[in-house]
Amino acid sequence: MKLSSTRYILALLAIIVLLVGALYAWLFTEIRDTNTAISSVVNQLDLQVKKDRRLNSIKALIEELGNEIAALDGRFVSRDGVVAFLEELEGLGSFSGASVDVNSVSLQARPGNTPDELLKIEFVSRGRWSSVMQLLALLETLPFSITFERVQLERIPTQGGLWQANVSFMVAKLK
Protein backbone atom coordinates (compact mmCIF):
# COMPACT_ATOMS: atom_id res chain seq x y z
CA MET A 1 0.00 0.00 0.00
CA LYS A 2 2.85 2.28 0.67
CA LEU A 3 4.15 1.75 -2.79
CA SER A 4 0.90 2.50 -4.39
CA SER A 5 0.33 5.66 -2.32
CA THR A 6 3.86 6.82 -3.19
CA ARG A 7 3.12 6.26 -6.87
CA TYR A 8 -0.17 8.02 -6.44
CA ILE A 9 1.60 11.00 -4.82
CA LEU A 10 4.28 11.01 -7.54
CA ALA A 11 1.66 10.86 -10.27
CA LEU A 12 -0.29 13.62 -8.58
CA LEU A 13 2.88 15.72 -8.24
CA ALA A 14 3.75 15.07 -11.90
CA ILE A 15 0.26 16.18 -12.95
CA ILE A 16 0.56 19.26 -10.72
CA VAL A 17 4.01 20.07 -12.19
CA LEU A 18 2.59 19.69 -15.71
CA LEU A 19 -0.39 21.88 -14.85
CA VAL A 20 1.88 24.52 -13.29
CA GLY A 21 4.14 24.36 -16.38
CA ALA A 22 1.13 24.73 -18.68
CA LEU A 23 -0.16 27.61 -16.55
CA TYR A 24 3.30 29.21 -16.69
CA ALA A 25 3.44 28.82 -20.48
CA TRP A 26 -0.08 30.22 -20.86
CA LEU A 27 0.72 33.20 -18.57
CA PHE A 28 3.98 33.81 -20.45
CA THR A 29 2.11 33.83 -23.78
CA GLU A 30 -0.58 36.17 -22.44
CA ILE A 31 1.99 38.57 -20.98
CA ARG A 32 4.01 38.51 -24.22
CA ASP A 33 0.90 39.20 -26.36
CA THR A 34 -0.25 41.96 -24.01
CA ASN A 35 3.24 43.46 -24.03
CA THR A 36 3.30 43.38 -27.85
CA ALA A 37 -0.13 45.05 -28.04
CA ILE A 38 0.89 47.72 -25.52
CA SER A 39 4.13 48.34 -27.42
CA SER A 40 2.17 48.76 -30.66
CA VAL A 41 -0.26 51.21 -29.03
CA VAL A 42 2.63 53.16 -27.47
CA ASN A 43 4.37 53.38 -30.87
CA GLN A 44 1.16 54.58 -32.55
CA LEU A 45 0.61 57.10 -29.77
CA ASP A 46 4.20 58.32 -30.08
CA LEU A 47 3.76 58.71 -33.84
CA GLN A 48 0.52 60.65 -33.32
CA VAL A 49 2.20 62.91 -30.74
CA LYS A 50 5.00 63.64 -33.22
CA LYS A 51 2.43 64.45 -35.93
CA ASP A 52 0.56 66.75 -33.54
CA ARG A 53 3.79 68.53 -32.61
CA ARG A 54 4.65 69.05 -36.28
CA LEU A 55 1.13 70.30 -36.99
CA ASN A 56 1.26 72.71 -34.03
CA SER A 57 4.67 73.90 -35.20
CA ILE A 58 3.33 74.55 -38.71
CA LYS A 59 0.28 76.36 -37.29
CA ALA A 60 2.56 78.55 -35.15
CA LEU A 61 4.73 79.29 -38.18
CA ILE A 62 1.68 80.26 -40.25
CA GLU A 63 0.51 82.56 -37.44
CA GLU A 64 3.96 84.16 -37.27
CA LEU A 65 4.04 84.63 -41.02
CA GLY A 66 0.43 85.82 -41.25
CA ASN A 67 1.35 89.48 -41.76
CA GLU A 68 4.01 88.63 -44.33
CA ILE A 69 1.60 86.34 -46.21
CA ALA A 70 -1.07 89.05 -46.21
CA ALA A 71 1.46 91.59 -47.48
CA LEU A 72 2.55 89.21 -50.22
CA ASP A 73 -1.06 88.49 -51.19
CA GLY A 74 -1.58 92.24 -51.46
CA ARG A 75 0.97 92.36 -54.30
CA PHE A 76 -1.43 90.41 -56.54
CA VAL A 77 -4.84 91.23 -57.94
CA SER A 78 -7.17 88.68 -56.36
CA ARG A 79 -8.95 86.00 -58.40
CA ASP A 80 -12.15 88.00 -58.58
CA GLY A 81 -10.58 91.43 -58.14
CA VAL A 82 -10.17 92.54 -61.77
CA VAL A 83 -13.22 94.81 -61.72
CA ALA A 84 -12.18 96.30 -58.38
CA PHE A 85 -8.67 96.94 -59.75
CA LEU A 86 -10.09 98.70 -62.83
CA GLU A 87 -12.36 100.78 -60.59
CA GLU A 88 -9.30 101.68 -58.51
CA LEU A 89 -7.48 102.74 -61.69
CA GLU A 90 -10.41 104.95 -62.68
CA GLY A 91 -10.53 106.32 -59.13
CA LEU A 92 -6.86 107.28 -59.40
CA GLY A 93 -7.72 109.13 -62.59
CA SER A 94 -10.53 111.03 -60.86
CA PHE A 95 -8.27 111.81 -57.91
CA SER A 96 -5.51 113.17 -60.14
CA GLY A 97 -7.91 115.09 -62.39
CA ALA A 98 -7.25 113.03 -65.53
CA SER A 99 -9.77 110.95 -67.44
CA VAL A 100 -9.13 107.21 -67.76
CA ASP A 101 -10.59 105.18 -70.63
CA VAL A 102 -9.68 101.49 -70.49
CA ASN A 103 -9.21 100.14 -74.03
CA SER A 104 -8.46 96.49 -73.33
CA VAL A 105 -8.02 93.98 -70.56
CA SER A 106 -6.53 90.55 -71.24
CA LEU A 107 -4.96 87.65 -69.38
CA GLN A 108 -1.59 86.15 -70.22
CA ALA A 109 -0.33 82.92 -68.69
CA ARG A 110 3.11 82.84 -67.12
CA PRO A 111 5.47 80.09 -68.25
CA GLY A 112 5.54 77.08 -65.97
CA ASN A 113 3.14 76.03 -63.28
CA THR A 114 2.70 79.24 -61.28
CA PRO A 115 -0.19 80.35 -59.04
CA ASP A 116 -0.49 83.65 -60.88
CA GLU A 117 -1.02 85.06 -64.34
CA LEU A 118 -0.53 88.46 -65.90
CA LEU A 119 -3.37 90.91 -66.36
CA LYS A 120 -2.56 93.20 -69.30
CA ILE A 121 -4.35 96.55 -69.23
CA GLU A 122 -4.24 99.23 -71.91
CA PHE A 123 -5.80 102.63 -71.26
CA VAL A 124 -5.81 106.21 -72.48
CA SER A 125 -5.68 109.12 -70.08
CA ARG A 126 -6.33 112.76 -70.90
CA GLY A 127 -5.81 115.85 -68.81
CA ARG A 128 -3.35 118.56 -67.88
CA TRP A 129 0.31 117.57 -67.82
CA SER A 130 0.40 117.58 -64.02
CA SER A 131 -2.77 115.46 -63.81
CA VAL A 132 -1.51 112.84 -66.25
CA MET A 133 1.88 112.67 -64.51
CA GLN A 134 0.22 112.40 -61.10
CA LEU A 135 -1.92 109.51 -62.40
CA LEU A 136 1.19 107.69 -63.65
CA ALA A 137 2.99 108.32 -60.36
CA LEU A 138 0.02 107.01 -58.37
CA LEU A 139 -0.23 103.95 -60.60
CA GLU A 140 3.46 103.31 -60.14
CA THR A 141 3.19 103.45 -56.35
CA LEU A 142 0.29 100.99 -56.07
CA PRO A 143 1.23 98.01 -53.89
CA PHE A 144 0.76 95.61 -56.82
CA SER A 145 3.46 93.99 -58.91
CA ILE A 146 3.12 96.28 -61.96
CA THR A 147 5.33 96.28 -65.05
CA PHE A 148 4.87 99.07 -67.57
CA GLU A 149 5.14 97.95 -71.19
CA ARG A 150 4.44 101.25 -72.91
CA VAL A 151 3.85 104.84 -71.86
CA GLN A 152 3.36 107.29 -74.72
CA LEU A 153 2.77 110.94 -73.85
CA GLU A 154 1.62 113.44 -76.44
CA ARG A 155 0.16 116.88 -76.39
CA ILE A 156 -3.31 117.22 -77.91
CA PRO A 157 -2.88 120.19 -80.29
CA THR A 158 -6.58 120.93 -80.71
CA GLN A 159 -7.25 121.05 -76.98
CA GLY A 160 -4.61 123.61 -75.94
CA GLY A 161 -2.70 122.47 -72.88
CA LEU A 162 -4.20 118.97 -72.58
CA TRP A 163 -2.07 115.87 -72.78
CA GLN A 164 -2.85 112.28 -73.65
CA ALA A 165 -1.08 109.23 -72.26
CA ASN A 166 -1.38 105.85 -73.98
CA VAL A 167 -0.39 103.34 -71.32
CA SER A 168 0.03 99.58 -71.39
CA PHE A 169 1.06 97.66 -68.28
CA MET A 170 0.93 94.22 -66.72
CA VAL A 171 -0.08 93.40 -63.18
CA ALA A 172 0.20 90.03 -61.45
CA LYS A 173 -3.14 88.34 -60.77
CA LEU A 174 -3.86 85.16 -58.84
CA LYS A 175 -5.38 82.36 -60.93
Image (tube, rainbow, N blue to C red):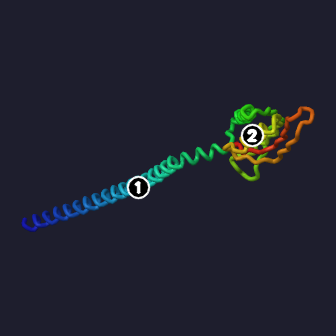
Select label 2 or label 1 by which is in front.
Answer: 2
Of helix, strand and loop, which one carries label 2?
A: helix
Return the residue found at the far right. Answer: 158
**Which residue bears the numbered disc 2?**
134
Residue at 76 percent across and 32 percent down: it is 97
- The quarter of the displayed image where residue 4 is located: bottom left
Return the residue found at the far front. Answer: 160
Please say if the residues under marks 2 and 1 sit with CB atoms less than 8 Å apart. no
Give the quadrant of the C terminus.
Answer: top right
Residue at 79 percent across and 38 percent down: it is 132
User: Is 90 on the left-hand or right-hand side of 154?
Assistant: left
Location of residue 111 with respect to 98 vertically, above or below: below
**Which residue bears the numbered disc 1?**
46
> Earlier along the polypeptide chain: callout 2 or callout 1?
1
Give the class, few, some or many, for how many residues have Cα within 10 Å of label 1's Cα (few <14, many ≥20). Answer: few
Name the kind of residue labelled 1 in the image. Answer: Asp
Between 137 and 21, the residue placed more toward the observer is 137
Residue 154 picture location, percent across and down: 88, 41
